[in-house]
Amino acid sequence: RYLFAEVESFLLYDFYTAGGNVDENVFAYSNRTGSERSLVLYHNRYAETSGWVRTSAAYAVKGADGEKTLMQKTLAEGLGISADPHSYLIFRDALTNLEYIRSCQDLCERGLYAELHAYQGHVFVDFREVHENRLGQYGQLNAALNGRGVPSIAEALKELFLAPVHAPLR
C-alpha cells in the first residue's frame, strides 16, 4: 500500500497517441519508495487506444527564492532507469501476473508503448534491471516477445536458449 500512497516521488504522465495528441482518458502515474517502483495505466473509456507514456505532466517546484517553476520528468527519471544500451528492465503486471521485458535505452528515448482496451488497466511492479549476458539473450528475448507479456521471463529465456535443441526433437 505504501508504494501507492506516498507522494514524494509521485508523477502523473501524459499518454500520447500515434497522432501526437494526449489521450485524456488514460490515467498514467508512477511512484517510488526506496528501490521499489510502480507504474499504473488505466483507460477510462469504452474504446481502444494505444500510445506512449514518456513525459510527466508539468508540476510546480518551489525554488530557494520562493519562486515556483514548472518542471517535467521523463518516465525513465520517474522510475530511475539507466540509459545503458546493454540493460533491460523486467517488470510484472500485478493484475495479470504476466512479466514484461523492455530495453532500458528504448524506455529512456521513447518511453513505454501500451495498447489499452476499454476500461483496461495495468499495475506494473517488481521492476528489476538486468545487464545483457555474453550471448545476447535478453536482447533476443525482447525482440522475440515484441512487447508481449509471459508468465515468466526466466522460463521464456530458458525456452529461447533451448530452442535449437527442442526443434530437432519435435
Image: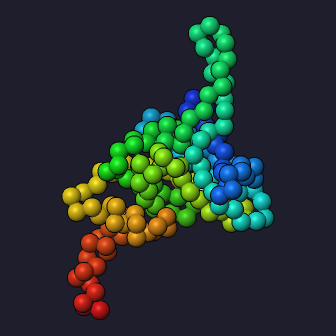
Residue 69 placement, left or right of 3? right
Residue 153 occupies quadrant? bottom left
Residue 74 placement, left or right of 138? right
Residue drawn where x is 60% and y is 14% of the image: 63
Seen as rendered, the residue at the extreme top is 65
Residue drawn where x is 29% and y is 64% of the image: 137
Residue 139 showing in the rendered view: yes
Tell which of 10 and 97 is nearer to you: 10
List x then y, in percent, for residue 115: 62, 63
Q: Can you say which quadrant of the picture contains the C terminus?
A: bottom left
Residue drawn where x is 56% and y is 35% of the image: 73
List x then y, in percent, for residue 104: 41, 49
Above or below: residue 22 compared with residue 165: above
Residue 76 placement, left or right of 170? right
Residue 113 occupies quadrant? bottom right
Total labels drawn? 0
Q: Can you say which quadrant of the picture contains the N terminus?
A: top right
Residue drawn where x is 64% and y is 43% of the image: 13
Above or below: residue 31 compared with residue 112: above
List x then y, in percent, for residue 3: 54, 40
Seen as rendered, the residue at the extreme right is 46
List x then y, in percent, for residue 19: 69, 56
The structure's colour scheme is: rainbow
Above or below: residue 98 compared with residue 29: below
Residue 71 occupies quadrant? top right
